[in-house]
Amino acid sequence: MQLSPLTAISPLDGRYAARNDALRGLFSEYGLMRQRLRVEIAWLITLAETPGITEIQPLSAESRNKLDRLAQEFDLPAAARIKGIETTTNHDVKAVEYYLKENVRGNPELERVSEFLHFACTSEDINNLAYALLLQQARAQQLLPVMEKLGERLRGLAHRYAEVPMLSRTHGQPASPTTLGKELANTVARLRRQQAQLASVIINGKLNGAVGNFNAHLAAYPDLDWQAISKKLVESFGLQWSAYTVQIEPHDYMAEYFDALARFNTVMIDACRDIWGYISLGYFRQKTASGEVGSSTMPHKVNPIDFENAEGNLGVANALLRHFSEKLPLSRWQRDLTDSTVLRNIGVAIGHSLLAYESFLRGLSKLEADESRLRSDLENNWEVLAEAVQTVMRRYGLETPYEQLKNLTRGKRITSDDLHRFIRDQEIPQQAKQQLLALTPSGYIGLAAQLAREI
């Protein structure tokens, strides 16, 4: 069957294909090939600039331009050619090396030094740097910008609804009031922390040969400082050099990266569920779109599908991300190949994450608080002021204030008259009594409005 968005197995390339264009250039096979090519070229240039390797001199401007064009103009036909070479080599990294050798023909200088392409390298010297560059770009170009957008959108809503009082529901039961804006501000604060954690993960890279000891390098050039040469190349990509590795870079930083992303996603899941619940309670209304259907049989429905879609995609992403962080740091002895197929799914996890963020943002754009519904819930739950009353009674030394309020309110609905009658009977200073009598559920919000505005 011909491949199309309708026949694709993965929904990222099927149903959601149009929403994943930004990732195709990164985490597709084409994207991986492009980064491998970039690393191979950078290594050749590094060797050419290394004093002591007399067989290869600093490259001319013409040769540098030729290599730059190979990297910058890498396109789908070029990727297809590498794939064609791989049908013979049955080795994807070797196919990149052969592709480069094929494409420097006609340039005498580059032909003469073509055996320094992939010099002393194991495939993992190229692969680990290629994946590091993919993760570096995905974080900078995709993840952090949309995370920032999410935080700012929520922050805007937190400010808009900073003073809109709302009944809290600890354990699902009526509890001390807050404001709608403060609850959104809580999510902003949590997301910011996890975003910062992801941004701070140091991405590592290595280039030190088959088992991490520069064996082949020293066999060819025993007098060169190969650690310094390797470090120079790795750091030229904005990565941190890993001095101690086996054949593979240990992937510990990847575990940190994926754990941080999963924690951000977990906060997002929590936000999806809370907002879904507030929609269910009627605290939020959703703007309707012309022609959109909520249910195939119930015409009245406006379902919170954006938050449901986001939650589902975040769950898929986290299942993969948690597997990555648990599996990738493990490798039998100096190398096994179990990481290879796992690494190819990095883009899947990031793709589902980005789909979720987009759905969440779309859902936020449809929300509008129903302040009358919020007020009604508060007015029907005067018992939530029991906390305030018993705390003031404690201040003035009255006996068993908690127990008295428990008898008055626990498991009951009381009216303002019931509560006011109780307050008037208490032997507390008149000023304190008047302050309690003036208190309403809508006014009992502590610093919630201030905290929401300060986020």
Image (cartoon, rainbow, N blue to C red):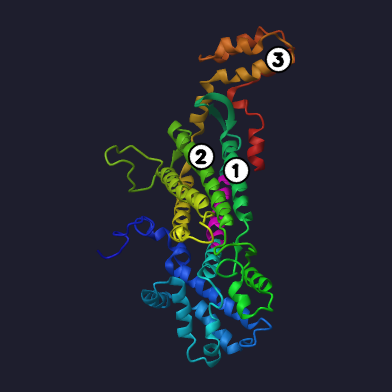
Which stretch appears magenta? 136-156
Residue 96 % position (x, y)? 46, 76
Determine which residue is flagged by label 2.
Answer: 270
Q: Quadrant of the N terminus?
A: bottom left
The disc at residue 177 is: none
Contact (Cβ within 8 Å) of mark 1 with mark 2: yes
Determine which residue is flagged by label 3.
Answer: 394
Q: Quadrant of the C terminus?
A: top right
For the residue pair 271 and 152, the one nearer the viewer reads as 271
Nearer-N-terminus badge (3/1): 1
Q: CA distance from mark 1 to mark 2?
A: 11 Å
Residue 202 % position (x, y)? 63, 58
Figure check: 397 above or below 15: above
Nearer-N-terminus badge (2/3): 2
> SS of the residue at dot 1?
helix
Q: Amino acid at mark 1?
A: Arg
Contact (Cβ within 8 Å) of mark 2 with mark 3: no
Determine which residue is flagged by label 1.
Answer: 190
Q: Amino acid at mark 2?
A: Asp
Figure check: 381 above or below 59: above
Q: CA distance from mark 3 to mark 1?
A: 34 Å
Determine the image quadrant of residue 285: top left
Residue at x 47%, y 89% (from the top left corner): 105
Q: Is residue 139 found inside the magenta-colored segment of the image? A: yes
Figure check: 47 above or below 304: below
